[in-house]
């Protein structure tokens, strides 16, 4: 329905979306119409409708509540099971746009459960513009994780040789691990074990390629950049290297920045003639012990080095 | 009573009246385009009418334009506009023995790299991703949104060496070519190099603006150039090929077929004094030389949004058409809204 006057495209969409979000007597039909390109401002077809809807979400202080309300309405449409009961004239377009809208909204409180239910139904099939709808589901799931519950799905989907409902590769796994909270109450913190596992898989799959270093650094850096200002990455990734038995070449290039005592441990690994995981892990553990003994007790990292030392010894013993 | 496609038939009266009376320039523009686009043949109008529910409502006409575009244009290997049976009056090449325009004339396509998010997502599916694409797609985002795609392309292109940029453009064209083998993505909009050349130095905002393209910045944009022969069947566009797009503007009846349509220049001060030619063709494979042949490769990043109102843009365009083709234009379309 015409509601905007002469607004430029984004502002025009924002007027339409804001008016709909303010309506109390809404139903999912309007959303379904938009998702297949109906009733949107006339801006052509070069972008999918979900992009226009995301652009239509208000900015600044209105953004967060508007996003939450939008996500609640998207969840209502997901709960109507459009994967089981086809909706609209182009059901694949509706589903693709719905799932990519979920990915863009990234509101796990509202969307994690309905998306998880959709995954468990295993009914989603088809393509939109050549893109498998399960690729869109994967994007929606990765962007709306509330805890570790999807980890077994990612690990299962990653296994070779069998046809899985979701196809993922090492990049997807890094992406999933990067955005996965360790638990519902620890959101905003990295899930270190899944991250360590994901980076280990990258090292395995790229072991014999010339570009392995570039790829490993790039992915590890993307993980680190997801949690800006977090100080313990050097220690945590070294611990993951011990726990997951990363190859020596990957440990040597763990991207910084990190404190001098972590640099020293990595430098010792580089300088060492040892290449087996057990020997390298021993070097790292020794480095933790040394750092712990050298750091004054009042140093903010002293306690964490003590923890790292204990944890790495534990992993070494388990491996023994 | 409003005409339809320039003819005094009135199957969509209620919808068109509602759009004209809406007070909304977007819907009014669409009404004018439906009313005055004489380039839509009777056969094509019939084909379009198949998508319209009767009695025709405002929502029904909107749906029909979207559905027709999806079904007969966007997703077809051979889109409707290449068929003589429905679009012979708009075919520029492949129409007669002697070509209407020289086959070696160069065309220019403005390709918005940010606008290919779905294509990259397709290429990044594990079953499909080629080794040669790995490094470029390594950090392609999971959530394919404006900001994420922009961030990813900025990382690839901002401050990169000429060689790195060339490698990225080559990969993107390779992905686009692979995609077009499997999935239609129609139509391709072009103008001639002759007409576009004066604007090349003005940068990416102007490249889009002069061709009537509105997109939310930032966008990485490249210019591709190739011959009429390489484009295959070239056609004059109609509103049905543009779909639900208020920035499309029909060309007047006295414009020659050879010059195609006319994109609406979005800059109104200073206003354009002559129209550019506008054509469409179906997807063609792109070689790197299509990019490098233009001074080694033209690429730019848009940063400022178009501040002009649609009403002003459409009035300025109609005014330019009137000055260029004469006041007869006003008897064809008296108002753009």
Image: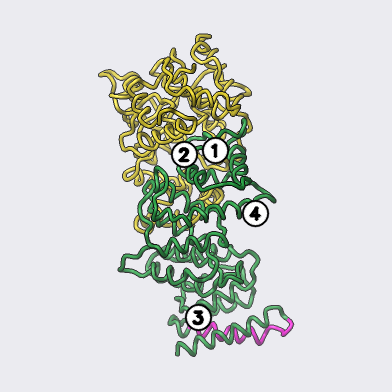
Q: Are marks 4 and 3 on the same chain?
A: yes
Q: Dot 4 corresponds to which residue?
A: A64
Q: Are marks 3 and 2 on the same chain?
A: yes
Residue B134 position within the rendered picture, expressed as x and y whole percent measured from the top left: 41, 57
- Is A15 above or below relative to B269? below
Q: Dot 1 corresponds to which residue?
A: B215
Colour green, chain: A
- Alpha-carbon distance for marks 2 and 1? 9 Å
Q: Quadrant of residue B104?
A: top left
Q: Secondary structure at mark 3?
A: helix
CB under 8 Å between callouts 2 and 1?
yes
State which tag comes first along the sequence, 3 or 2. Answer: 2
User: Looking at this view, is A126 or B238 the one in front?
Assistant: A126
- Alpha-carbon distance for marks 4 and 2? 27 Å
Q: Nearer the viewer, mark 4 or mark 2?
A: 4
Q: Dot 3 corresponds to which residue?
A: A242
Q: Chain of mark 4?
A: A
Q: In the displayed structure, does residue B94 sit left or right of residue A228?
A: left
Q: Colour of chain B?
A: yellow
Residue A201 position within the rendered picture, expressed as x and y whole percent measured from the top left: 42, 71
Q: Dot 2 corresponds to which residue?
A: A46
Neighbour tally class for label 3: few under 14, some 14-19, many 20 plus, Cα within 10 Å: many
Residue range of the region highlighted in magenta in the rendering? A280-298
Q: Are marks 3 and 1 on the same chain?
A: no
Query: The C terminus of chain A is located in which quarter?
Result: bottom left
Q: Secondary structure at mark 2?
A: loop
State which tag comes first along the sequence, 4 or 3. Answer: 4
Q: Chain of mark 2?
A: A
State which tag comes first along the sequence, 4 or 2. Answer: 2
CB under 8 Å between callouts 3 and 1?
no
Residue A84 position within the rendered picture, expressed as x and y whole percent measured from the top left: 39, 55
User: Looking at this view, is A95 or B111 the one in front?
Assistant: A95
């Amino acid at each position: 329905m015409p509601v905007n006057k002469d607004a430029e495209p984004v502002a025009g969409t924002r007027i339409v979306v804001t008016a709909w979000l303010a309506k109390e007597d809404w139903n999912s039909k309007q959303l379904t119409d938009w998702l297949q390109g109906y009733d949107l401002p006339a801006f052509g077809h070069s972008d999918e409708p979900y992009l226009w809807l995301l652009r239509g979400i208000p900015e600044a202080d209105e953004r967060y509540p508007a996003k939450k309300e939008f996500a609640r309405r998207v969840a209502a449409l997901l709960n109507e099971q459009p994967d089981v009961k086809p909706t609209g004239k182009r059901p694949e377009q509706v589903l693709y746009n719905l799932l990519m809208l979920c990915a863009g909204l990234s509101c796990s409180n509202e969307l994690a459960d309905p998306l998880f239910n959709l995954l468990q139904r295993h009914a989603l099939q088809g393509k939109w513009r050549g893109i498998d709808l399960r690729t869109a589901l994967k994007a929606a799931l990765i962007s709306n994780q509330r805890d570790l519950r999807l980890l077994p799905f990612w690990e299962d989907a990653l296994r070779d040789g069998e046809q899985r409902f979701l196809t993922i590769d090492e990049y997807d796994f890094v992406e999933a691990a990067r955005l996965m909270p360790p638990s519902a109450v620890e959101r905003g913190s990295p899930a270190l074990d899944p991250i360590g596992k994901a980076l280990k898989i990258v090292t395995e799959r790229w072991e014999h390629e010339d570009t392995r270093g570039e790829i490993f650094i790039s992915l590890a850096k993307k993980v680190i950049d997801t949690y800006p200002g977090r100080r313990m990455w050097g220690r945590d990734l070294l611990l993951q290297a011990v726990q997951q038995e990363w190859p020596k070449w990957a440990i040597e290039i763990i991207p910084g920045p990190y404190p001098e005592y972590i640099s020293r441990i990595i430098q010792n690994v580089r300088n060492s003639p040892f290449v087996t995981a057990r020997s390298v892990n021993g070097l790292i553990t020794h480095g933790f012990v040394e750092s712990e003994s050298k750091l004054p007790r009042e140093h903010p990292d002293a306690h964490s080095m003590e923890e790292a030392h204990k944890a790495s010894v534990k992993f070494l013993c388990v491996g023994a | 009573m409003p005409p339809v496609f320039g003819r005094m038939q009135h199957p969509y009266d209620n919808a068109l009246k509602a759009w004209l009376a809406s007070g909304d320039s977007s819907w009014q523009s669409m009404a004018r385009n439906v009313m005055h686009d004489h380039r839509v043949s009777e056969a094509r109008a019939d084909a379009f009418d198949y998508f319209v529910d009767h009695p025709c409502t405002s929502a029904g006409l909107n749906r029909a334009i979207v559905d027709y575009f999806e079904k007969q244009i966007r997703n077809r290997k051979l889109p409707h506009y290449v068929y003589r049976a429905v679009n012979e009056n708009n075919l520029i090449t492949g129409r007669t023995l002697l070509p209407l325009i020289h086959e070696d004339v160069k065309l220019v396509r403005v390709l918005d790299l940010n606008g290919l998010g779905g294509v990259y997502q397709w290429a990044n599916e594990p079953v499909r991703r080629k080794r040669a694409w790995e490094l470029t797609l390594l950090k392609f985002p999971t959530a394919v949104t404006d900001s994420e795609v922009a961030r990813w392309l900025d990382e690839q292109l901002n401050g990169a060496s000429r060689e790195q940029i060339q490698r990225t453009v080559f990969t993107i064209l390779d992905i686009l070519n692979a995609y077009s083998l499997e999935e239609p993505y129609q139509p391709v909009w072009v103008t001639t190099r002759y007409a576009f050349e004066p604007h090349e130095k003005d940068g990416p905002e102007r490249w889009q603006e002069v061709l009537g393209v509105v997109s939310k910045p930032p966008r990485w944009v490249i210019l591709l150039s190739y011959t009429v022969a390489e484009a295959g069947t070239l056609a004059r566009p109609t509103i049905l090929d543009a779909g639900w797009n208020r920035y499309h503007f029909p060309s007047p009846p006295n414009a020659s077929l050879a010059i195609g349509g006319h994109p609406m220049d979005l800059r109104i001060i200073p206003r354009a004094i002559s129209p550019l030619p506008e054509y469409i063709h179906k997807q063609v494979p792109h070689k790197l030389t299509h990019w490098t042949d233009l001074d080694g490769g033209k690429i730019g990043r848009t940063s400022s949004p178009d501040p002009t109102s649609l009403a002003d843009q459409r009035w300025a365009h109609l005014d330019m058409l009137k000055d260029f083709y004469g006041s007869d234009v006003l008897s064809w379309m008296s108002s753009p809204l």
